[in-house]
Image (cartoon, coloured by chain):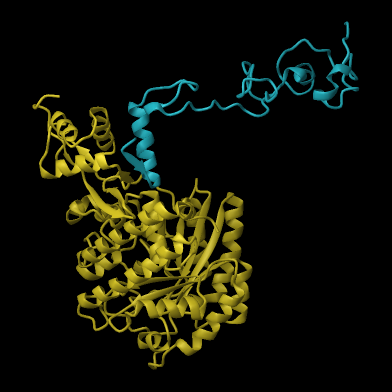
Amino acid sequence: MTSTVTPLSLGEFHHFQTSGVDFLYLVPSGGIFAVSPAGRTAMELLREKPLDADDLLTALVAKGYSAPDAQEAITDLFEARAIRDVRGFEDPPQDPVDNFPLQSLVMNLTNQCNLSCQYCYEFGEDKVATPDGKPKFMSEEVAKASVDHLITSSKGRRAIHITFFGGETLMNFPLLKWVVTYATEQAQLAGQFLDFSLTTNGTLLSPEVIDFLVENSIGVTVSMDGPKEMHDALRVYANGKGSYDVLAPKVKALIAKHSTRPIAARVTLTQQVTSVKDIFHHLKHEMGFAEVGFAPVTAAPDRLYTIGNSSMDRVFEQFKELAVEYRDWAVENRMHGFSNVSDTLAEIHAGINKSHPCGAGLGLVGVGPSGDIAPCHRFVDSDTHALGSVLDGGLDKAKQKEFLDRGHIGAKFDCHTCFARPLCAGGCHHEAFVRYGDTGHPNLHFCDWIRGWTDLCLNIYGEIAVKNPGFLDRFEQRKPLQ
Amino acid sequence: MKHLKAVNKKAHRIEQHAAAVHGDIYGMQQGGPGGAPAARPHYPVGCSIVFSPGWEVDSAGGTAGLCQPAERDLYDCYVTCFWPAQVPDHYNNYPDWTSKCASATKDWRNIELVFP
């Protein structure tokens, strides 16, 4: 090669080292490779300055590698785009195809709740819903139209999914039962596999409800914030009384009886509740949940329950300890149950490279009691974010496009130099709206946290890949059918 | 790729892509890139529903593992195979031609010649 050719320089990747192996996480693609000493040396040389291929080869030979070996190392790195001869950004991920078939429908059966959790985005000042003049409970008519919308909009998919949500989902249990019967029939007619899940605060889990959930293999996620003193800090009734004593025995009864689907706990972390390890221990080992997932509360920065930076650092340290415990279990081929790690490992394993942070408005939509279609359950009954109505013409393609264009990683310039963008893609649309008033704004307040978490999970992935690669087979299917 | 070992699924796809774009095409007996050992050709077990003449020997070089061993040719061309061999017309004239042949590999000698 002559010197008129653009010299080789480093591509975009995140290097990590674990168990004595050097790994490259290639950012534009999401691929993970273990790199040989010769490859590593080539990259160190290019880190100092860009070099022509001939000069790089000569430098590698000078370091003691044979010429064919050095040439092959350069070729391999180039093929994988770990090194490259172009400047500027790689192509952003492709846009989703037109008429992307729907996969999941979240039905907010009611916006009413029997609790008044102080951080709830349904009731807090940060709410995006505009419920005035709209029904609080979904009717059979809206439910039927919602199911029909799912079936007609999911053509070509073998498996589809309905999640029941609220408010408190079980306050509209009669409709839930009706939907399970109707939707199952419709899915059978369409030749599709349909499964159900629901999210509940657990306070209304009667024996009758539990039997129904078991009989119909309905997946259950319980919103629960930990042991009594933590749970009762913010998850309270309207009179201020904590809800732990009401739900704990009911949840235990559910877990004892429901074995067809893993029962998960979903914890909201707030300034008052950040003891991740204690919470996990209680929910996994004392309550008996199969999985426990955590998320920080979504709120404007001036709310009293919003987690401050120092608390987020503390949360990260505890996430890390728990994640390391997960890794040790995985090396011994045991499932730990910290679902934040499982979810991230599944995406790392696939090598996912997201155009959008989640499936909202794409493979997933929410429908509220009014029949309005929202990008997801968090935007239900928000006039500003409605993407049409199941009662009137279905999805509004123009509004959907506007929402998706706004949330596309290509439009988030802050993200373009971040190694975590294939997995993060800027973060939750709803969180962004509450913080910045724009669903397409990157969640900059979480960047350090997300990069730390991504690096941690990459290290864990690498270590499992070295010590117990068979464990990773369980991530072969990203969302396996139950 | 000798200097990069694919770890996750996306990396495997990148590796396959690179091989497809730049790799040579190798005969099955010839060995792969970088002195990799010869990939053993895939011999189907039991063919008779695919177009498969040419499997004269099995992967060990013999005839025992063939989908239609020589001993069974006559019988299987008669019963299960599409291959247009010269066998008696068992639909009309010789329906009992193989009645003494319960197991082709053992009883093939019992199948008698017929003269139309």
Q: Residue furthest top?
A: B115
Q: Position of residue A97 (x, y in %)?
A: 36, 44
Q: Is residue A437 above or below residue A82?
A: below
Does residue A398 appear left or right of residue A342 in this picture?
A: left
A388 horizontally vs A425: left or right:
right
Q: Identify the chain drawn in cyan.
A: B
Q: Quadrant of residue A89?
A: top left
Q: Is residue A378 left or right of residue B28?
A: left
Q: How many marks are shown on the rendered structure?
A: 0
In the picture provided, is A361 more to the left or to the right than A477?
left
Residue A133 visible to an observer of this rendering: no
- Of B26 and A404, nearer the camera is B26
Q: x, y (%) of residue A184?
A: 59, 59
Q: Nearer the viewer, residue B37 or B47?
A: B37
Residue drawn at x 54%, y 71% as measured from the top left: A176
Instruction: Give the residue drawn at x 38%, y 35%.
Output: B16
Q: Name the residue located 40 percent from the left edge and 26 percent from the top edge.
A: B35
Task: State which chain is coloured yellow.
Answer: A
* Figure check: A237 above or below A307: below
The C terminus of chain A: image quadrant: bottom right
Residue at the image position 58 percent from the left and 80 percent from the top: A253
Q: Position of residue A477 (x, y in %)?
A: 48, 51
Foreground pick, A83 / A148:
A83
Q: Residue at the far front: name it.
A: A64
| Residue A57 image position (x, y, % from top left) | 18, 31
Establish if A228 lies above or below B109. below
Asked if residue A176 shows in the view, the reply is: yes
Quarter of the picture containing the N terminus of chain A is top left
